[in-house]
Image (cartoon, grey):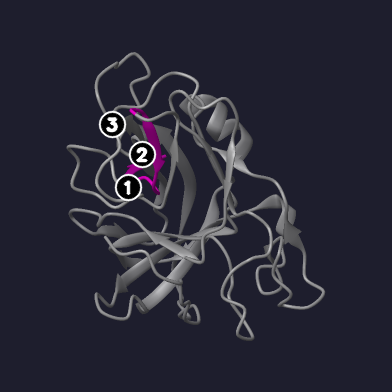
Amino acid sequence: MRLLPLVLVPLAACSASASAQFELANTTSAARVAPHVLDDGTSLRLKIIAVYLAEDVDPTTMDNIGQTEMIWINPQCNGDISGCNVDGFTEPAGGPRITDYFDLARPTEVVNAELNSQAMTVSTGSYKYARLELCKAYGGQNQATQPTMMWRGPGMTADRPFTSGDCGRTSLAFDPPLELGAGDSVAVTLGYDLGSSVVSGAPGNGGFEIAGTDHWFRDCADIDDTHRACMDFPDFAPSAAKL
């Protein structure tokens, strides 16, 4: 899975349609207590603009291939997907800004209650990925002037702000691809396990590593000389069920 700016293509015209409703599933086991595994109380909060289905994604450029269909838009966008951006970007000028963080560390039912997703009309077809739009980088501004994420790991006493210049997150692939026919109605769910996203352990050799893990994290906080907490985006595993 790659994490690069999300490039959207125009939606394909289509005479037939289906509907899709977006959901999240927090599969983190809060009861697990082991090295490098999330503890109770840990949080990961993101600013999310919208979620799309993508027919395919170029593995090199990460551009969309084929049609895309939006299945959720942040209420703070007020329905204006073109002008909406996260707080801290100057473009698109005059458009709505997202200031609220979406807390992924809560139970699934609480997360979905806040999503308040409604079924959205989408074109029929085959879709391989779901993609989260996290920001829009225009006019040479590649990073927001306000934090785009807040996180807290085991042993930390307060949330830590972080600003990511990555504007898109691509899910793991639907396997098999999601096939939508005329009149189909599905719930598209992205499952995530924060146990591999916010972790703790002994400091590794680098400033963004945990000893014993083969991963370079986005941000880390040293609790003391022997304890470090680190954060990265979670993997999003897609599934779909007919409504």
Task: Look at label 3 and name its amino acid.
Answer: Ala
Residue 142 falls left or right of residue 219: right
Number of the label disc, if any, that sits on residue 235: 1
Label 2 residue SS: strand
C-alpha span from label 3 to label 2:
24 Å
**Residue that appears at 54% across and 60% down:** 134
Between discs 2 and 1, the one toward the N terminus? 2
Q: Residues within 10 Å of mark 1 (few under 14, many from 20)?
A: some
Given the current orientation, which residue lies at the most extreme right position?
94
Instruction: Specify the segment rendered in magenta.
Output: 226-243
Task: Look at label 1 and name its amino acid.
Answer: Asp
Task: Look at label 2 and name its amino acid.
Answer: Tyr
Residue 148 location, x and y as percent?
Answer: 60, 54
Give the answer, above or below, for where 104 lies relative to 107.
below
Between discs 3 and 2, the one toward the N terminus? 2
Res 177 quadrant in image: bottom left
> Considering the image in quadrants, where does the N terminus appear?
bottom left
> Considering the image in quadrants, where does the C terminus appear?
top left
Answer yes or no: is residue 93 visible: yes
Label 1 residue SS: loop
Residue 145 falls left or right of residue 15: right
Residue 116 falls left or right of residue 97: left
Label 3 residue SS: loop
Residue at label 2?
Answer: 192
Res 199 quadrant in image: top left
Q: Is residue 239 magenta?
A: yes
